[in-house]
Amino acid sequence: MSKVILNHGAGGELMQEFLSKHITNHFPSMNAEVPLDSMDDSAVVDDVVFTIDGHTVKPLFFPGGDIGKISVAGTVNDISVMGASPLALACSVIMEEGLDIDVVDRVMDSMGKTAAECGVPIATGDTKVVEGGAVDQMVMSTSAIGKRSQYLDSDLAKAAEYRKVENRWCTDSSVRPGDAIIVSGYMGDHGIALLSFREGYGFESEVQSDVAPLNKMIAEGLKAGGIVAMKDPTRGGLANTLNEWCSKSHVGMEIDYSSIPLRDGVVNACDLLGIDALSIGNEGKCVMGVVPEMAEEVLKAIRRTPEGKDAAIIGRAVEGTEHVVLRTEVGGRRILEAPAGDPVPRIC
Ligand code: MG
């Protein structure tokens, strides 16, 4: 009998296949503007934006963050990248018997501070305790609802000045040939900081997790106008995000490798460990598809925020293929595939 493996939860192609064959196929189809089938960051049901995220990060505390901060930031980001404003969070915490109560206080304090920072209250929740060994210390599930951002209509109207805009939300299927691709900062920091800290590689002195709520940065981008798609490149990293956009939007991508913000510590760690920095999960970054005429304006707007200060335009969507083509520093071209699974498990 086949068994669940770690890569079934790793955000890559194996997980997509697992979800469609063993999870979502059992559910009744739904009639919604952004339904489950679209596999976006959030669903949109009767103009309510709705998401949930599970957190199994190991260890609970790591350089730059902890499970409490990730649980709030990750959920707020999944709502925000749809072009929505998060209204409230719900959290379920499952704790292992024997866990230090001091650990619980530290995690909840961090959750509370992050919720205050992004201005989204934790409105409801649940706690359970299970016998020792039934979970590893603590796992959390965090859900949120959001409503249409007050800036989304003007954002899409700005895009519509330059080309036809079919979607009412910033979905994975909204990218069109010619759109500029922006990343909001350095790629791979979270996964490398966590892996390095957990395994004792020592790169965490140079690289810290980027975990951060992005709702304020995204609001500034929407105010500038012309953003048509957004996604937080978590599990599977930038490679997964761009490939998902290609297959759901039926476009190709041309990406300039040298334009992608990558820290030396991340590049060195990836070289040493034989993993691809572009397949590593981030927790405080956003990828944006923007009509080309507004790309510089959006870039300027998000660079004025602390979370977007290192943002860059890394390439554009093109017609005629559904592949991501990476132009390398030495003038070569290679296809950037979606990772089969995350090279770094249990980072979120
Ligand atoms: Mg997401």
Image: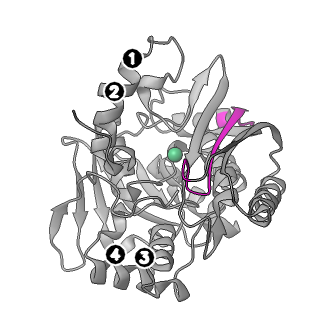
Cα distance in 3D space between marks 2 and 4: 39 Å
340 sits to left or right of 277: left
249 sits to left or right of 187: left
The amino acid sitting under disc 1 is: His
Cα distance in 3D space between marks 3 and 4: 9 Å
Mark 3 or mark 2, which is nearer the start of the sequence? Answer: 2
Do the residues under discs 2 and 1 have CB atoms within 8 angstroms?
A: yes
Q: Name the front one of labels 2 and 4.
A: 2
Do the residues under discs 1 and 4 have CB atoms within 8 angstroms?
A: no
Q: Is residue 284 visible?
A: yes
For the N terminus, the quadrant is: top left
Q: How is the image coloured?
A: one colour
**Mark 1: secondary structure:** helix
Do the residues under discs 1 and 3 have CB atoms within 8 angstroms?
A: no
Residue 243 image point, x, y percent: 31, 47
Residue for badge 3: 262
Do the residues under discs 2 and 4 have CB atoms within 8 angstroms?
A: no
Residue for badge 4: 258
Residue for point 58% across, 61% down: 284
Residue 313 image point, x, y percent: 45, 63
Region of the chain picked out in magenta, as a range: 133-152
The crowding category of the residue bearing disc 2, from other C-alpha atoms within 10 Å (few below 14, some 14 to 19, many at least 20), is: few
Mark 4 or mark 2, which is nearer the start of the sequence? Answer: 2
Whether residue 227 is in magenta: the answer is no
Residue for badge 1: 26
**Mark 3: secondary structure:** loop
The amino acid sitting under disc 4 is: Ser
Q: Is residue 151 visible?
A: no
